[in-house]
Amino acid sequence: MRQTRAPQTQFSSLTTTVQRAIHPLWHSLMALLVAFGLATLVGCSDSKSTADAGSDALAADAVDDTGEQEDVLKPPTLSVTVTAKPGTGNAPLPVEFEATVSGDDPANLFIEWDFGDSSMPVIYNLSLPEESGGLKVKNTYSYKGSYNAHVKVYWRYNSKVKAEAAATIVVNEPVALSLGSVDLISPPTVGIGSDVSLTFAVENTGDTIANPLQVNVYVSATQVLDESAVLLYTQTISNMASGKTSASIVYFGNDPDGKSAPCHFTVPATLPDGDYFILVMVDPSHSLNEVNQADNFGVATSLLNVNNKVAALPDLVITSPDFDGTLSYSPGDSLTYWHEISNIGDGEAK
């Protein structure tokens, strides 16, 4: 047992002696070598981890959870068309745009609208419920000019996959309509079925009107155009030239050349007896944007009196002639016969 422990004691003693004999500088050098070795090992470990992570990421892109190869998304062939209504009109002009997309589900797309005016482009993410209405948008053009509105659709997985379309909007300067004097030229007292005739003129002192506008005639117990007014006549004016440099007038009778017909309407059977104002309204639906629309309205200078008893129409009937029975006559003989004229109508024949 002593022989076994003796070498250990001597080795331990020798080690202790050697350690005591080592210079302090040697300790410092060894510490530096150990630190460098550890740093190298840590660096190798980090590099391997990063590479492994990259490999794992690539693998995740290539396979699904079951380890099978996933299908790669193929870019669609997108197309888009756009409609603008109206395409022309007077400022301020509200325009409704609608895009029609094909090639992929709109939920996979972004859509961008550039209206060609001073407004900023607007982008909608069509996959979001609150932005899914981005296929139909509105914009108002405030100033005269020709505008190129553009719409672009982008595939959400690759913005280089896209399609675009354009529409041109032509905006004229504002219109300036006015209604002239409304004059009743037929008898003021009428009955059911009577014809009523008016003259008036519609003038535009603004820019060209390219869109149709309506002129309506009503009768009402008051001078206010409301739901109680009865519409008895409507006429469409297809367009009007600019009145900025020369007169632009549509006549309803009483024109200088005598070529236009007055406005005519018939008293309906449903209209009760009484006195009525005749109201005329230009562009009643306000389809044209004007600074002043108050002068689009007018009232006839005379009241219309509906009185079916006084203004009832006559209906005359004449019977066949009845001769005195003489069968032959010579030249110069007098011929005697009788016939009757009767009025079967409700009105007096004068």
Image (cartoon, helix red, strand yellow):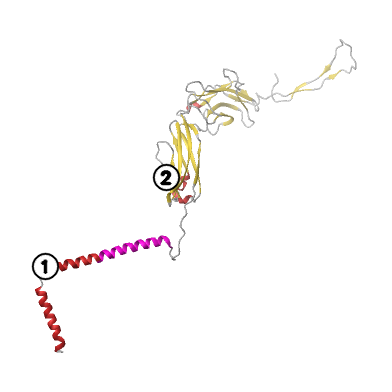
Location of residue 148 by image quarter: top left
In magenta stretch: residue 105: no
Residue furthest bottom as drawn: 1
Residue on which the image places disc 1 = 25
| 184 and 295: which is toward the camera | 295
Percent position (x, y) of residue 132?
A: 46, 48
Residue at figure coordinates x 20%, y 65% from the top left? 36
Residue on which the image places disc 2 = 123
Q: Amino acid at mark 2?
A: Ile
| Region rendered in magenta | 41-63
Q: Amino acid at mark 1?
A: Leu
| 162 and 303: which is toward the camera | 162
- Secondary-structure class at tag 2: strand
Percent position (x, y) of residue 22?
A: 10, 72
10 on left or right of 97: left
| 13 and 273: which is toward the camera | 13
